Amino acid sequence: MHQRLLATVLPLALAMPAAAGPGLAAQPAPRIHSVCDLSQQFSFYLDGRFHTQYLQGVGRDARNWGSLHRLDLSNVNLLVVDGGDPRLPYSSASLDHVVDYVERGGTLLVMLDGGDPMPPAAGLTERFGVRPTTERAATPLRAREPFEAEADSFRGGTVLDVPAAASVLLEDRDRRPVLAVVDAGEGHLLVGSRGLFGHQPDAKDPIHAAWITPLLVELATTKSIDPKRPHRSTWAEHARELGPLTLEYHDGTEPFAVAIAKEYERVRPHLVAVTGVEPAPGMLKNLLILPTGGGGFSSGQRIAIGAWWGDYPDQRYPMVELIGHEAGHSWVLPHAEPLWNEPIATWLGIQVGKRLGMEEADQTLQRQIRLGRRHDPQFDSIDPLGEDAPRDLIWGKSYFVFEELERRFGPGAMAKYFRTKRRLVAPDRNGYSMDDCVAVWGRAVGEDLFDWFRGLAFDVDPGRSDLAGNR
Protein backbone atom coordinates (compact mmCIF):
# COMPACT_ATOMS: atom_id res chain seq x y z
CA MET A 1 0.00 0.00 0.00
CA HIS A 2 1.35 3.41 -0.92
CA GLN A 3 3.00 5.47 1.78
CA ARG A 4 0.75 8.49 1.19
CA LEU A 5 -2.21 6.57 2.59
CA LEU A 6 -0.36 5.60 5.74
CA ALA A 7 0.91 9.10 6.28
CA THR A 8 -2.50 10.72 5.88
CA VAL A 9 -4.61 8.50 8.11
CA LEU A 10 -3.73 10.26 11.37
CA PRO A 11 -4.23 13.82 10.08
CA LEU A 12 -7.55 12.74 8.62
CA ALA A 13 -8.55 11.23 11.94
CA LEU A 14 -7.78 14.49 13.69
CA ALA A 15 -9.78 16.50 11.16
CA MET A 16 -12.91 14.39 10.87
CA PRO A 17 -14.82 14.64 14.16
CA ALA A 18 -14.80 18.38 14.73
CA ALA A 19 -17.21 20.91 13.34
CA ALA A 20 -15.69 23.81 11.48
CA GLY A 21 -14.34 26.55 13.71
CA PRO A 22 -15.28 30.23 13.53
CA GLY A 23 -14.74 31.58 10.05
CA LEU A 24 -13.88 28.18 8.60
CA ALA A 25 -16.02 26.42 6.02
CA ALA A 26 -17.16 22.93 6.95
CA GLN A 27 -15.39 20.17 5.06
CA PRO A 28 -17.63 17.95 2.93
CA ALA A 29 -18.16 14.51 4.45
CA PRO A 30 -16.35 11.70 2.65
CA ARG A 31 -18.74 9.55 0.67
CA ILE A 32 -18.88 5.82 1.40
CA HIS A 33 -21.46 3.37 0.16
CA SER A 34 -20.95 0.33 2.36
CA VAL A 35 -22.59 -3.08 2.43
CA CYS A 36 -22.42 -5.30 5.49
CA ASP A 37 -22.77 -8.92 4.46
CA LEU A 38 -25.18 -11.08 6.46
CA SER A 39 -25.22 -14.02 4.06
CA GLN A 40 -22.60 -16.26 5.68
CA GLN A 41 -23.36 -15.58 9.33
CA PHE A 42 -26.08 -13.28 10.61
CA SER A 43 -25.19 -11.00 13.50
CA PHE A 44 -26.98 -8.02 14.98
CA TYR A 45 -23.59 -6.29 14.96
CA LEU A 46 -23.31 -6.22 11.18
CA ASP A 47 -27.03 -5.49 10.93
CA GLY A 48 -26.44 -1.79 11.55
CA ARG A 49 -24.14 -1.62 14.56
CA PHE A 50 -20.86 -1.63 12.62
CA HIS A 51 -22.09 1.28 10.56
CA THR A 52 -23.16 3.16 13.68
CA GLN A 53 -19.74 2.74 15.22
CA TYR A 54 -17.42 3.39 12.30
CA LEU A 55 -19.27 4.91 9.35
CA GLN A 56 -21.91 7.18 10.87
CA GLY A 57 -21.72 10.55 9.15
CA VAL A 58 -19.30 9.50 6.42
CA GLY A 59 -21.67 7.64 4.16
CA ARG A 60 -24.64 5.30 3.99
CA ASP A 61 -24.91 1.58 4.64
CA ALA A 62 -26.91 -1.29 3.21
CA ARG A 63 -27.13 -4.97 4.17
CA ASN A 64 -26.86 -8.09 2.08
CA TRP A 65 -29.25 -10.84 3.19
CA GLY A 66 -29.03 -12.90 0.01
CA SER A 67 -26.40 -14.95 -1.77
CA LEU A 68 -23.28 -12.83 -2.07
CA HIS A 69 -22.64 -13.55 -5.74
CA ARG A 70 -26.01 -11.95 -6.60
CA LEU A 71 -25.16 -8.65 -4.86
CA ASP A 72 -24.89 -5.55 -7.05
CA LEU A 73 -21.60 -3.90 -6.06
CA SER A 74 -21.38 -1.41 -8.91
CA ASN A 75 -22.13 1.60 -6.70
CA VAL A 76 -20.47 0.24 -3.55
CA ASN A 77 -16.96 1.14 -2.39
CA LEU A 78 -16.81 -0.77 0.92
CA LEU A 79 -17.88 -4.36 1.52
CA VAL A 80 -17.71 -5.57 5.15
CA VAL A 81 -17.65 -9.27 6.09
CA ASP A 82 -16.73 -11.24 9.18
CA GLY A 83 -15.41 -14.77 9.48
CA GLY A 84 -18.65 -16.59 8.77
CA ASP A 85 -19.77 -20.02 9.94
CA PRO A 86 -18.06 -23.21 8.72
CA ARG A 87 -21.49 -24.75 8.09
CA LEU A 88 -21.94 -22.29 5.22
CA PRO A 89 -18.84 -21.94 3.03
CA TYR A 90 -18.63 -19.33 0.31
CA SER A 91 -19.59 -20.55 -3.13
CA SER A 92 -17.02 -20.26 -5.91
CA ALA A 93 -19.33 -17.76 -7.59
CA SER A 94 -19.30 -15.54 -4.49
CA LEU A 95 -15.51 -15.70 -4.17
CA ASP A 96 -15.08 -14.75 -7.82
CA HIS A 97 -17.63 -11.95 -7.48
CA VAL A 98 -15.86 -10.35 -4.52
CA VAL A 99 -12.39 -10.66 -6.05
CA ASP A 100 -13.66 -8.98 -9.21
CA TYR A 101 -15.20 -6.19 -7.10
CA VAL A 102 -11.87 -5.52 -5.39
CA GLU A 103 -9.84 -5.62 -8.57
CA ARG A 104 -12.21 -3.07 -10.08
CA GLY A 105 -11.46 -0.63 -7.26
CA GLY A 106 -13.61 -1.69 -4.31
CA THR A 107 -12.41 -2.02 -0.73
CA LEU A 108 -13.09 -5.22 1.20
CA LEU A 109 -12.87 -5.31 4.99
CA VAL A 110 -12.60 -8.81 6.47
CA MET A 111 -12.72 -9.16 10.27
CA LEU A 112 -11.75 -12.68 11.28
CA ASP A 113 -9.66 -14.93 13.46
CA GLY A 114 -8.35 -18.32 12.48
CA GLY A 115 -9.87 -21.44 13.97
CA ASP A 116 -10.28 -25.17 13.57
CA PRO A 117 -12.02 -25.47 11.23
CA MET A 118 -11.13 -22.24 9.51
CA PRO A 119 -14.00 -19.79 9.01
CA PRO A 120 -15.30 -19.44 5.44
CA ALA A 121 -13.79 -15.95 5.05
CA ALA A 122 -10.36 -17.59 5.16
CA GLY A 123 -11.11 -18.91 1.66
CA LEU A 124 -11.81 -15.33 0.62
CA THR A 125 -8.65 -13.74 2.04
CA GLU A 126 -6.54 -16.59 0.64
CA ARG A 127 -7.50 -15.40 -2.84
CA PHE A 128 -5.39 -12.33 -1.97
CA GLY A 129 -2.55 -14.30 -0.37
CA VAL A 130 -3.62 -13.68 3.27
CA ARG A 131 -4.07 -16.68 5.54
CA PRO A 132 -5.40 -16.48 9.09
CA THR A 133 -3.64 -18.69 11.60
CA THR A 134 -4.63 -20.27 14.89
CA GLU A 135 -1.70 -18.60 16.71
CA ARG A 136 -2.88 -16.17 19.37
CA ALA A 137 -1.63 -12.60 19.17
CA ALA A 138 0.62 -11.53 22.04
CA THR A 139 -0.08 -8.10 23.52
CA PRO A 140 0.67 -5.26 23.53
CA LEU A 141 -0.01 -4.54 19.88
CA ARG A 142 1.90 -1.81 18.13
CA ALA A 143 1.62 0.07 14.86
CA ARG A 144 4.22 -0.24 12.15
CA GLU A 145 5.64 3.02 10.90
CA PRO A 146 4.46 5.24 9.34
CA PHE A 147 0.97 4.10 10.44
CA GLU A 148 -0.02 5.80 13.68
CA ALA A 149 -2.65 4.04 15.76
CA GLU A 150 -3.25 2.71 19.25
CA ALA A 151 -4.86 -0.70 19.74
CA ASP A 152 -5.13 -0.72 23.51
CA SER A 153 -8.69 -2.10 23.48
CA PHE A 154 -7.78 -5.31 21.63
CA ARG A 155 -10.14 -8.09 22.75
CA GLY A 156 -7.77 -10.85 21.66
CA GLY A 157 -7.46 -12.86 18.49
CA THR A 158 -5.06 -14.51 16.09
CA VAL A 159 -2.25 -13.35 13.84
CA LEU A 160 -2.07 -13.37 10.06
CA ASP A 161 0.22 -14.88 7.46
CA VAL A 162 0.51 -12.18 4.77
CA PRO A 163 2.38 -11.90 1.46
CA ALA A 164 5.53 -9.81 1.19
CA ALA A 165 3.69 -7.13 -0.77
CA ALA A 166 1.18 -6.54 2.03
CA SER A 167 1.36 -3.39 4.14
CA VAL A 168 1.29 -4.47 7.78
CA LEU A 169 -0.42 -1.80 9.88
CA LEU A 170 -0.51 -3.49 13.30
CA GLU A 171 1.63 -6.28 14.70
CA ASP A 172 1.73 -8.13 17.98
CA ARG A 173 4.48 -8.17 20.57
CA ASP A 174 6.38 -10.76 18.53
CA ARG A 175 6.13 -8.65 15.35
CA ARG A 176 3.49 -10.86 13.74
CA PRO A 177 0.79 -9.18 11.59
CA VAL A 178 -2.62 -8.50 13.13
CA LEU A 179 -3.94 -5.92 10.65
CA ALA A 180 -2.80 -5.54 7.06
CA VAL A 181 -3.71 -4.10 3.67
CA VAL A 182 -3.22 -5.88 0.35
CA ASP A 183 -3.65 -3.97 -2.90
CA ALA A 184 -5.30 -5.98 -5.68
CA GLY A 185 -5.89 -4.43 -9.07
CA GLU A 186 -7.40 -1.02 -8.37
CA GLY A 187 -8.81 -1.93 -4.95
CA HIS A 188 -7.82 -3.01 -1.47
CA LEU A 189 -8.29 -5.79 1.04
CA LEU A 190 -8.13 -4.68 4.67
CA VAL A 191 -7.98 -7.73 6.93
CA GLY A 192 -7.56 -7.88 10.68
CA SER A 193 -8.35 -9.81 13.80
CA ARG A 194 -11.99 -9.64 14.83
CA GLY A 195 -10.83 -8.49 18.27
CA LEU A 196 -9.75 -5.11 16.88
CA PHE A 197 -13.36 -4.11 16.23
CA GLY A 198 -16.48 -3.64 18.32
CA HIS A 199 -18.93 -6.48 18.82
CA GLN A 200 -21.69 -5.41 21.21
CA PRO A 201 -25.21 -5.56 19.72
CA ASP A 202 -25.98 -2.24 21.42
CA ALA A 203 -23.06 -0.60 19.58
CA LYS A 204 -21.56 0.75 22.80
CA ASP A 205 -17.98 -0.34 22.12
CA PRO A 206 -16.72 1.63 19.10
CA ILE A 207 -13.15 0.67 19.87
CA HIS A 208 -10.41 2.22 17.73
CA ALA A 209 -12.91 4.34 15.77
CA ALA A 210 -10.47 7.28 15.93
CA TRP A 211 -8.23 5.55 13.40
CA ILE A 212 -10.42 2.79 11.87
CA THR A 213 -12.91 5.32 10.46
CA PRO A 214 -10.37 7.48 8.61
CA LEU A 215 -8.56 4.34 7.41
CA LEU A 216 -11.78 3.03 5.88
CA VAL A 217 -12.52 6.41 4.33
CA GLU A 218 -9.06 6.65 2.81
CA LEU A 219 -9.23 3.16 1.33
CA ALA A 220 -12.84 3.15 0.18
CA THR A 221 -12.84 6.53 -1.52
CA THR A 222 -10.22 5.40 -4.03
CA LYS A 223 -13.31 4.08 -5.85
CA SER A 224 -15.75 6.77 -6.85
CA ILE A 225 -19.46 6.20 -6.30
CA ASP A 226 -22.52 8.18 -7.29
CA PRO A 227 -23.95 9.51 -4.00
CA LYS A 228 -27.14 10.56 -5.80
CA ARG A 229 -27.83 6.95 -6.77
CA PRO A 230 -28.47 5.14 -3.50
CA HIS A 231 -27.46 1.53 -3.12
CA ARG A 232 -30.02 -0.68 -1.46
CA SER A 233 -30.11 -3.63 0.89
CA THR A 234 -30.54 -6.95 -0.89
CA TRP A 235 -33.03 -9.45 0.50
CA ALA A 236 -32.87 -13.25 0.49
CA GLU A 237 -33.64 -14.17 -3.09
CA HIS A 238 -35.85 -17.23 -2.63
CA ALA A 239 -39.48 -17.18 -1.45
CA ARG A 240 -41.91 -20.05 -1.15
CA GLU A 241 -45.57 -19.63 -0.29
CA LEU A 242 -46.73 -21.97 2.48
CA GLY A 243 -50.38 -21.10 2.82
CA PRO A 244 -50.55 -17.71 4.59
CA LEU A 245 -46.80 -17.81 5.32
CA THR A 246 -43.95 -16.84 3.00
CA LEU A 247 -40.72 -18.79 3.57
CA GLU A 248 -37.60 -16.72 2.75
CA TYR A 249 -34.07 -18.08 2.25
CA HIS A 250 -31.00 -17.87 0.05
CA ASP A 251 -28.90 -20.46 -1.74
CA GLY A 252 -26.85 -21.34 1.33
CA THR A 253 -29.74 -21.68 3.78
CA GLU A 254 -31.98 -23.61 1.39
CA PRO A 255 -31.03 -27.04 2.89
CA PHE A 256 -32.39 -25.86 6.28
CA ALA A 257 -35.43 -23.95 5.07
CA VAL A 258 -37.92 -26.73 4.32
CA ALA A 259 -37.18 -28.63 7.55
CA ILE A 260 -37.62 -25.49 9.69
CA ALA A 261 -40.84 -24.61 7.88
CA LYS A 262 -42.19 -28.05 8.75
CA GLU A 263 -41.26 -27.47 12.38
CA TYR A 264 -43.17 -24.19 12.27
CA GLU A 265 -46.22 -25.97 10.87
CA ARG A 266 -46.08 -28.39 13.83
CA VAL A 267 -45.62 -25.57 16.36
CA ARG A 268 -48.33 -23.18 15.16
CA PRO A 269 -51.48 -25.13 16.12
CA HIS A 270 -50.09 -25.68 19.62
CA LEU A 271 -49.50 -21.93 20.02
CA VAL A 272 -53.12 -21.35 19.00
CA ALA A 273 -54.25 -23.94 21.55
CA VAL A 274 -52.17 -22.45 24.40
CA THR A 275 -53.15 -18.83 23.67
CA GLY A 276 -56.72 -19.49 22.58
CA VAL A 277 -56.40 -17.02 19.69
CA GLU A 278 -54.78 -16.63 16.31
CA PRO A 279 -51.78 -14.31 15.88
CA ALA A 280 -52.57 -10.60 16.06
CA PRO A 281 -54.10 -9.26 12.83
CA GLY A 282 -51.50 -8.65 10.13
CA MET A 283 -48.78 -10.52 12.01
CA LEU A 284 -46.76 -13.65 11.22
CA LYS A 285 -46.65 -13.45 7.45
CA ASN A 286 -42.98 -14.23 6.76
CA LEU A 287 -40.45 -16.78 8.00
CA LEU A 288 -36.82 -15.86 7.23
CA ILE A 289 -34.06 -18.44 7.62
CA LEU A 290 -30.94 -16.83 9.12
CA PRO A 291 -27.43 -18.23 8.55
CA THR A 292 -26.62 -18.55 12.24
CA GLY A 293 -26.90 -20.78 15.26
CA GLY A 294 -27.26 -17.68 17.43
CA GLY A 295 -31.02 -17.45 17.72
CA GLY A 296 -33.53 -15.32 15.85
CA PHE A 297 -35.72 -12.24 16.03
CA SER A 298 -39.26 -11.09 15.41
CA SER A 299 -40.69 -7.93 13.93
CA GLY A 300 -44.22 -9.20 14.42
CA GLN A 301 -45.01 -9.66 10.76
CA ARG A 302 -41.74 -11.47 10.07
CA ILE A 303 -39.98 -13.98 12.29
CA ALA A 304 -36.39 -14.97 11.62
CA ILE A 305 -34.96 -18.29 12.77
CA GLY A 306 -31.31 -19.33 13.07
CA ALA A 307 -30.78 -22.25 10.70
CA TRP A 308 -28.74 -24.41 13.07
CA TRP A 309 -29.91 -23.10 16.44
CA GLY A 310 -29.31 -25.59 19.24
CA ASP A 311 -27.42 -27.94 16.89
CA TYR A 312 -30.45 -28.41 14.67
CA PRO A 313 -31.35 -30.79 13.06
CA ASP A 314 -29.48 -33.18 15.38
CA GLN A 315 -31.36 -31.66 18.36
CA ARG A 316 -35.02 -30.71 17.85
CA TYR A 317 -36.22 -29.23 21.13
CA PRO A 318 -34.18 -25.99 21.04
CA MET A 319 -35.53 -25.27 17.56
CA VAL A 320 -39.13 -25.97 18.62
CA GLU A 321 -38.70 -23.62 21.59
CA LEU A 322 -37.10 -20.91 19.43
CA ILE A 323 -39.87 -21.02 16.83
CA GLY A 324 -42.46 -20.90 19.62
CA HIS A 325 -40.66 -17.95 21.17
CA GLU A 326 -40.25 -15.84 18.04
CA ALA A 327 -43.72 -16.68 16.73
CA GLY A 328 -45.14 -15.99 20.19
CA HIS A 329 -44.21 -12.33 19.84
CA SER A 330 -46.80 -12.13 17.05
CA TRP A 331 -49.52 -13.09 19.52
CA VAL A 332 -48.90 -10.33 22.08
CA LEU A 333 -48.87 -7.44 19.60
CA PRO A 334 -49.84 -4.67 19.09
CA HIS A 335 -49.15 -4.27 22.83
CA ALA A 336 -45.98 -6.00 23.98
CA GLU A 337 -46.15 -7.56 27.42
CA PRO A 338 -44.68 -5.36 30.17
CA LEU A 339 -41.79 -6.92 32.14
CA TRP A 340 -42.13 -10.43 30.74
CA ASN A 341 -42.34 -9.89 26.99
CA GLU A 342 -39.34 -12.18 26.48
CA PRO A 343 -40.17 -14.70 29.26
CA ILE A 344 -43.74 -15.15 28.06
CA ALA A 345 -42.52 -15.86 24.53
CA THR A 346 -40.12 -18.56 25.77
CA TRP A 347 -42.81 -19.96 28.10
CA LEU A 348 -45.02 -20.38 25.04
CA GLY A 349 -42.21 -22.25 23.29
CA ILE A 350 -41.78 -24.44 26.36
CA GLN A 351 -45.48 -25.24 26.39
CA VAL A 352 -45.32 -26.29 22.76
CA GLY A 353 -42.42 -28.60 23.60
CA LYS A 354 -44.40 -30.12 26.48
CA ARG A 355 -47.40 -30.69 24.24
CA LEU A 356 -45.12 -32.44 21.76
CA GLY A 357 -43.87 -34.75 24.51
CA MET A 358 -40.32 -33.35 24.70
CA GLU A 359 -38.73 -33.96 28.11
CA GLU A 360 -36.37 -31.03 27.70
CA ALA A 361 -39.30 -28.61 27.86
CA ASP A 362 -40.23 -29.19 31.49
CA GLN A 363 -36.55 -29.47 32.42
CA THR A 364 -35.98 -26.01 30.93
CA LEU A 365 -38.96 -24.61 32.83
CA GLN A 366 -37.98 -26.04 36.21
CA ARG A 367 -34.32 -25.05 35.81
CA GLN A 368 -35.24 -21.40 35.28
CA ILE A 369 -37.61 -21.38 38.26
CA ARG A 370 -34.81 -22.81 40.43
CA LEU A 371 -32.45 -20.09 39.21
CA GLY A 372 -35.02 -17.47 40.13
CA ARG A 373 -35.45 -18.91 43.64
CA ARG A 374 -31.73 -18.44 44.29
CA HIS A 375 -32.47 -14.72 44.48
CA ASP A 376 -35.94 -14.93 46.05
CA PRO A 377 -36.62 -18.37 47.59
CA GLN A 378 -40.36 -17.80 48.13
CA PHE A 379 -40.79 -15.33 45.26
CA ASP A 380 -42.23 -12.82 47.73
CA SER A 381 -39.46 -10.34 48.48
CA ILE A 382 -37.91 -8.92 45.27
CA ASP A 383 -39.95 -6.70 42.98
CA PRO A 384 -39.23 -7.95 39.45
CA LEU A 385 -40.14 -4.49 38.20
CA GLY A 386 -37.22 -2.97 40.09
CA GLU A 387 -34.30 -1.58 38.12
CA ASP A 388 -31.84 -3.93 39.84
CA ALA A 389 -33.94 -7.09 39.57
CA PRO A 390 -31.67 -9.94 38.35
CA ARG A 391 -32.51 -11.45 34.99
CA ASP A 392 -32.83 -14.95 36.42
CA LEU A 393 -35.30 -13.62 39.01
CA ILE A 394 -37.43 -11.92 36.35
CA TRP A 395 -37.56 -15.01 34.15
CA GLY A 396 -37.97 -17.49 37.00
CA LYS A 397 -40.72 -15.50 38.72
CA SER A 398 -42.51 -14.96 35.41
CA TYR A 399 -42.57 -18.70 34.75
CA PHE A 400 -43.78 -19.29 38.33
CA VAL A 401 -46.62 -16.81 37.85
CA PHE A 402 -47.76 -18.45 34.62
CA GLU A 403 -47.61 -21.93 36.11
CA GLU A 404 -49.46 -20.87 39.27
CA LEU A 405 -52.21 -19.17 37.31
CA GLU A 406 -52.64 -22.30 35.21
CA ARG A 407 -52.76 -24.37 38.40
CA ARG A 408 -55.18 -22.10 40.27
CA PHE A 409 -57.61 -21.44 37.46
CA GLY A 410 -57.25 -24.65 35.52
CA PRO A 411 -55.42 -25.43 32.30
CA GLY A 412 -56.25 -22.73 29.80
CA ALA A 413 -55.75 -19.69 32.05
CA MET A 414 -53.26 -18.28 29.57
CA ALA A 415 -55.81 -18.69 26.77
CA LYS A 416 -58.36 -16.79 28.87
CA TYR A 417 -55.82 -14.02 29.34
CA PHE A 418 -55.08 -13.66 25.63
CA ARG A 419 -58.75 -13.70 24.67
CA THR A 420 -59.53 -11.06 27.30
CA LYS A 421 -56.61 -8.90 26.27
CA ARG A 422 -57.81 -8.94 22.67
CA ARG A 423 -61.32 -8.00 23.81
CA LEU A 424 -60.42 -5.24 26.28
CA VAL A 425 -57.27 -3.64 24.91
CA ALA A 426 -57.87 -1.62 21.77
CA PRO A 427 -55.12 -1.73 19.14
CA ASP A 428 -54.75 2.05 19.31
CA ARG A 429 -54.50 2.15 23.09
CA ASN A 430 -51.72 4.39 24.39
CA GLY A 431 -49.51 2.03 26.40
CA TYR A 432 -49.96 -1.22 28.28
CA SER A 433 -48.53 -1.26 31.80
CA MET A 434 -48.03 -3.98 34.38
CA ASP A 435 -51.05 -2.55 36.21
CA ASP A 436 -53.05 -3.04 33.01
CA CYS A 437 -51.67 -6.55 32.62
CA VAL A 438 -52.74 -7.62 36.12
CA ALA A 439 -56.15 -6.03 35.56
CA VAL A 440 -56.61 -8.06 32.38
CA TRP A 441 -55.54 -11.25 34.16
CA GLY A 442 -58.15 -10.58 36.84
CA ARG A 443 -60.88 -9.95 34.32
CA ALA A 444 -59.86 -13.10 32.46
CA VAL A 445 -60.12 -15.47 35.45
CA GLY A 446 -62.93 -13.65 37.26
CA GLU A 447 -60.95 -12.71 40.37
CA ASP A 448 -59.14 -9.57 41.53
CA LEU A 449 -55.46 -10.59 41.41
CA PHE A 450 -53.79 -7.37 42.57
CA ASP A 451 -53.34 -8.58 46.15
CA TRP A 452 -51.93 -11.88 44.88
CA PHE A 453 -49.40 -10.12 42.67
CA ARG A 454 -48.47 -7.72 45.47
CA GLY A 455 -47.87 -10.77 47.65
CA LEU A 456 -45.24 -11.75 45.08
CA ALA A 457 -43.60 -8.31 45.52
CA PHE A 458 -44.95 -6.80 42.29
CA ASP A 459 -45.50 -3.04 42.57
CA VAL A 460 -48.97 -2.94 41.00
CA ASP A 461 -52.05 -0.88 41.81
CA PRO A 462 -55.58 -1.12 40.37
CA GLY A 463 -55.91 2.63 40.74
CA ARG A 464 -53.35 3.06 37.98
CA SER A 465 -55.33 1.10 35.37
CA ASP A 466 -58.62 1.91 33.72
CA LEU A 467 -58.97 -1.80 32.93
CA ALA A 468 -59.35 -2.86 36.56
CA GLY A 469 -62.66 -4.12 37.95
CA ASN A 470 -65.78 -3.57 35.89
CA ARG A 471 -64.88 -0.17 34.52
Image (cartoon, grey):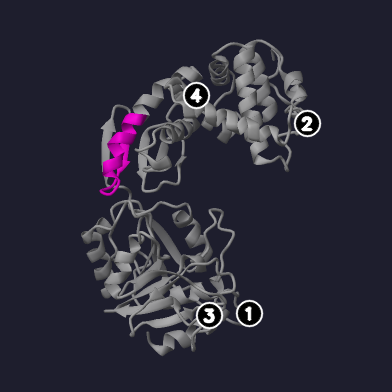
Q: Amino acid at mark 2?
A: Ser
* Disc on the earlier residue, 4 or 1: 1
Q: Is label 4 in contact with label 2 (beta carbons under 8 Å)?
A: no
What is the C-alpha distance between the residues marked 1 and 2? Answer: 57 Å
- The residue at 37%/30% (across/down) is 264
Q: Quadrant of residue 439?
A: top right
Can residue 136 be seen in the rendering of this structure? yes
Separation (CA) of disc 4 from disc 2: 27 Å
Per the image, label 3 sits on a secondary structure element best described as: loop
Q: Quadrant of residue 379?
A: top right
Residue type indicated by callout 3: Arg
Residue marked by disc 2? 381
- Could you tell me residue 166's position as x and y percent? 36, 82
Q: Mark 3, residues whose alpha carbon is within 10 Å: few (<14), some, or many (≥20)?
A: few
Q: Which residue is mark 1?
A: 21
Question: Mark 2, residues whose alpha carbon is within 10 Å: few (<14), some, or many (≥20)?
Answer: some
Image quarter hosting the N terminus: bottom left
Where does label 3 land, which residue? Answer: 173
Return the x and y of residue 204 as percentages of the image width and height.
59, 59
The spot of residue 229 in percent (x, y) is: 34, 63
Residue toward you, 225 or 134: 134
